[in-house]
Image (cartoon, rainbow, N blue to C red):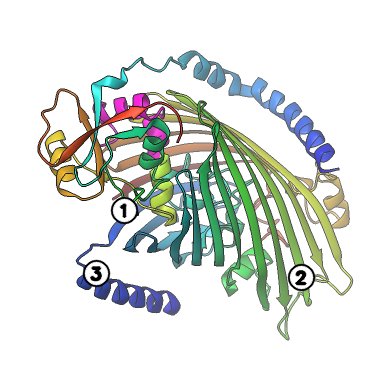
């Protein structure tokens, strides 16, 4: 019964949608579709994921990396808290990292973090404004994870992590 | 207000003592915004139809991690939306978040206290202006008159987040209730309501699914809530109650430069004995919105949205409500459609300005709900514009 109601419901709204499109939404929708562009091709190997040297691992799965940076996984397997560091949303390295390593657009990540922060469900990553600061913070904070450009010189206290495809 | 101050003082006192002991710092974020808006021939913002500055939203939140599995989160907000909802300060949320169980791919949390509504696309952050797609959300689903009921509850919530081989899951369940003050009672029923409206319970469940290799998200949300009304000795209403049951389907598709989202509402509202002993009104409302956002560049976002709502699917053109009211309530009080164009511009780090234009047809989603204001809302077609400046930290 509910399914039938929903079907009739959608049919009714579809007719009204068609009328509204005729009245002016068409131009916007067409513009939207024309603007649609292909995601820039970026290479994952130009970003290096780094973690604090107190962690014993040097590999993470792609799914685990995504869980950590979307703040869905808050603890390392040993039970210690994960501290996530990121560059600002408009930083090219951050945009590159989000698309190539997490398969997410930066605005999607921002939305996930905003929802956590302003609903109380969680915390957003800590922003740092330079790669030097990223290196310093990750090296000095137990349980920390971040990323740098592969051209950046590493420092003591860090592990370079390789990312493996697939779950978990 | 006194309750808010006491709770916050207690919270800050506890947090600061624990902070001193553990040398950890609470994490603090917030937002502040001010705007102007005008709705002509409508009491959506005010009764005069003049330009209004009743578009203020400010909030500050804090979270404190006691241990890897236990944290405290709280937020206080000040809101002024004119007639859209009662203005003033509110304790938005204050709850303990316990990570009860965690595996490699799943995490289960228990939230105890006053928590937000996590069940719809924008419900958890509906008062946080820079996180919203527009200043005024689609009223079919995010009816501002119901804001204080649908923003969250005092009670318990269970949150499960996880993934299978191909899908990412968010599952929420919550049970609780919301205190109803006098101004909210009048906002919902009528300015003449003198009694006490009480939400008996609010029971919600939702599930969101995202394919791991795609850009889509699907969601289903279910709501069941009961209310009762206790009249005062001098009251136009009688002892009675109401039931609200809702099903919401949602969909979102995200690409680099644009995003489409939609939520469809199926809503049952049942009133009993309120107008007179033996009175019954049982309606099935329906609503849906289609929203497109175009990310022109890192700073500028454009929005177009069509939002449609009918209070009663068996009275879409309002002829029944017109007849039953003896011609007192025009037929356009049975529906409300809204076509919106908007833009937001991030002109500096953590600063944003939003502007939008709405063209409405119908009045169904305005307060008071039960006995509507037919004096001010004298036109079927009306407009709203709004501009808002936002800063967050």
The chain containing the residue under callout 3 comes to: B
Residue A90, by quadrant, is: top left
Residue in view at x 39 percent, y 31 percent: A62
Nearer the camera: disc 2 or disc 3: 3
- Can you say whether B134 is above or below B255 in the image? below
Identify residue for label 3: B19
Residue A100, by quadrant, is: top left
- Residues rendered magenta in the picture: A86-110
Q: On the rendered structure, is A84 left or right of B87?
A: left
x, y (%) of residue B310? Answer: 74, 44
Identify residue for label 2: B241
Residue B50 visible: no
SS for dot 2 = strand
Labelled disc at residue A81? 1
Q: Nearer the viewer, residue B140 or B267?
A: B267
The chain containing the residue under callout 2 comes to: B
Residues under labels 2 and 3: Cα distance? 46 Å
């Amino acid at each position: 019964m509910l399914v039938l109601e929903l079907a009739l419901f959608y049919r009714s709204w579809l007719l009204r949608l068609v009328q509204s499109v005729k009245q002016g939404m068409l131009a916007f929708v067409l513009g939207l579709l024309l603007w649609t562009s292909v995601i820039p091709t970026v290479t994952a190997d130009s970003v290096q994921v780094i973690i604090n040297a107190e962690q014993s691992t040097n590999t993470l799965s792609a799914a685990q990396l995504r869980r950590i940076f979307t703040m869905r996984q808050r603890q390392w397997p040993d039970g210690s808290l994960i501290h996530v560091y990121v560059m600002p949303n408009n930083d090219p390295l951050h945009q590159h990292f989000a698309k190539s390593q997490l398969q997410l657009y930066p605005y999607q990540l921002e939305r996930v973090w905003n929802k956590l922060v302003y609903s109380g469900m969680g915390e957003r990553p800590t922003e740092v404004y330079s790669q030097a600061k990223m290196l310093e913070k990750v090296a000095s904070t137990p349980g920390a994870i971040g990323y740098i450009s592969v051209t950046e010189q590493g420092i003591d206290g860090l592990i370079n992590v390789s990312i493996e495809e697939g779950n978990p | 207000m006194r309750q808010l101050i006491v709770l916050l003082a207690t919270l800050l006192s506890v947090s600061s003592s624990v902070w001193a002991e553990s040398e950890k710092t609470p994490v603090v974020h917030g937002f502040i915004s001010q705007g102007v808006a005008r709705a002509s021939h409508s009491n959506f913002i005010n009764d005069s139809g003049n330009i209004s500055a009743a578009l203020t939203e400010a909030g500050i939140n804090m979270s404190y991690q006691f241990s890897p599995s236990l944290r405290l989160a709280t937020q206080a907000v000040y809101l002024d939306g004119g007639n859209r909802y009662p203005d003033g300060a509110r304790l938005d949320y204050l709850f303990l978040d316990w990570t009860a169980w965690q595996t490699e791919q799943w995490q289960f949390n228990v939230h105890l206290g006053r928590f937000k509504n996590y069940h719809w696309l924008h419900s958890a952050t509906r008062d946080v202006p820079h996180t919203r797609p527009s200043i005024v959300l689609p009223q079919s689903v995010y009816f501002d008159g119901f804001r204080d009921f649908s923003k969250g509850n005092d009670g318990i919530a269970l949150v499960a987040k996880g993934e299978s081989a191909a899908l990412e899951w968010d599952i929420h369940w919550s049970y609780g209730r919301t205190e109803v003050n006098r101004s909210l009672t009048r906002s919902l029923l009528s300015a003449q309501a003198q009694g006490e409206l009480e939400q008996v319970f609010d029971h919600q469940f939702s599930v969101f699914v995202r394919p791991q290799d795609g850009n889509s998200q699907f969601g289903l949300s279910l709501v069941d809530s009961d209310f009762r009304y206790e009249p005062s000795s001098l009251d136009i209403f009688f002892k009675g109650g109401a039931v609200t049951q809702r099903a919401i389907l949602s969909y979102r598709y995200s690409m680099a430069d644009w995003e489409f989202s939609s939520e469809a509402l199926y809503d049952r509202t049942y009133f009993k004995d309120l107008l007179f002993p033996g009175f019954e009104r049982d309606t099935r409302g329906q609503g849906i919105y289609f929203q497109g956002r175009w990310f022109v560049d890192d700073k500028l976002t454009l929005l177009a949205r069509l939002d449609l709502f009918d209070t009663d699917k068996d009275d879409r053109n309002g002829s029944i409500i017109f007849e039953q009211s003896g011609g007192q309530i025009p037929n356009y009080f049975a529906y409300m459609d809204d076509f919106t164009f908007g833009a937001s511009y991030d002109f500096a780090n953590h600063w944003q300005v939003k502007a939008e234009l709405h063209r409405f047809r119908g009045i169904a989603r305005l307060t008071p709900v039960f006995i509507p204001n037919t004096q001010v809302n004298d036109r079927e077609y009306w407009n709203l514009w709004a501009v808002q400046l936002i800063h967050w930290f």
